[in-house]
Amino acid sequence: MGITQSNFDGLTKVEVATKLLQAWEPEEGYYLAFSGGKDSVVIYDLAIKSGVNFDAHYCVSPIDPREVQLFIKEVYPEVIWDYHARGFWKMVVKKGLPMRQGRWCCQVIKEAGGLGRTVILGNRREEGTIRKKQKCYGPHRSQDKFFVRPIIDWNVGEVWEYIKMENLPYCSLYDEGFHRLGCILCPFERDVQRSIDRFPKITNLWRRACDRIVEYRLASGKVYKYDWQNGQEMWEWWIRRD
């Protein structure tokens, strides 16, 4: 079903999204989580078209592509930049590299904003097993905030259909073949070598972090699950994503 086709209620997906935003609008207005990706571009436009009051925020990530940050600055200058992840690389040394089973980085970078607010998110059920269970409206599992997900039932084709239909801007990395934008060398990323080749500066920061982690833990006498003697060994293990 395309976004311009009506469902059994006679509404299109665009109309459902705007009505959802209007129905749950808080008195103080929404906090719109803006990442610079295609989904956040869509929810931003939907929020404008629905007429709701909102302020958009980008939680600044030290491991986001520079192209994403330049896109936000140039095209969406009204978006507020929130700095929750200062000292990130020191955290990496103490907490260790983020893993699929222990992805602490999202809590520091992405999830720190919007406390006490109703947050508009661009999450979609199509994106993964966790998001399949998410609802269009509901509370955070532990923090003081609520989420509204107006495009939760959209697929990626419908997202691009809307972008083209409304002639919305989007980050140039999509034209390079990237399907999803986000933190460079995220533990869930599979095409690791492409990111290593495309983003050498942040890759080097991760590589140097491995050196510091090993040095820190060997000096403190901590025992590893794996017998890493230097940062290179740790780095090679991490990027294999076994």
Image: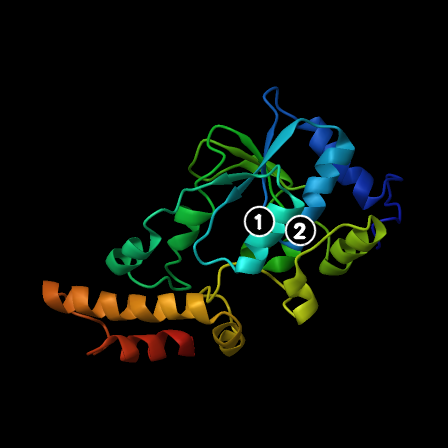
How crowded pointer 1 is (Cα within 10 Å; few <14, some 14-19, many 20+) is rated as: many
Q: Is residue 152 visible?
A: no
Q: Quadrant of residue 164?
A: bottom right
Q: Residue at x 63, y 64 (%)?
A: 173
Kindly identify which residue carries mark 2.
Answer: 39
Q: Nearer the viewer, residue 146 or 36?
A: 36
Going by the numbered disc 1, the residue's amino acid type is Ser
**Are dots 2 and 1 in contact, CB under 8 Å?**
yes
Q: Residue at x 47, y 47 (%)?
A: 60
Please tell me whether residue 211 is drawn above or below residue 41 in the rendered image. Answer: below
Please tell me whether residue 26 is drawn above or below residue 109 in the rendered image. Answer: above
Q: Position of residue 29 (x, y in %)?
A: 61, 25
How crowded pointer 2 is (Cα within 10 Å; few <14, some 14-19, many 20+) is rated as: many
Q: Nearer the viewer, residue 23 or 211?
A: 211
Q: Is label 2 or label 1 in front? A: 1
Q: Position of residue 231 (x, y in %)?
A: 26, 75
Secondary structure category for the residue under label 2: helix
Q: Position of residue 213 (x, y in %)?
A: 24, 65
Q: Which mark is residue 35?
A: 1
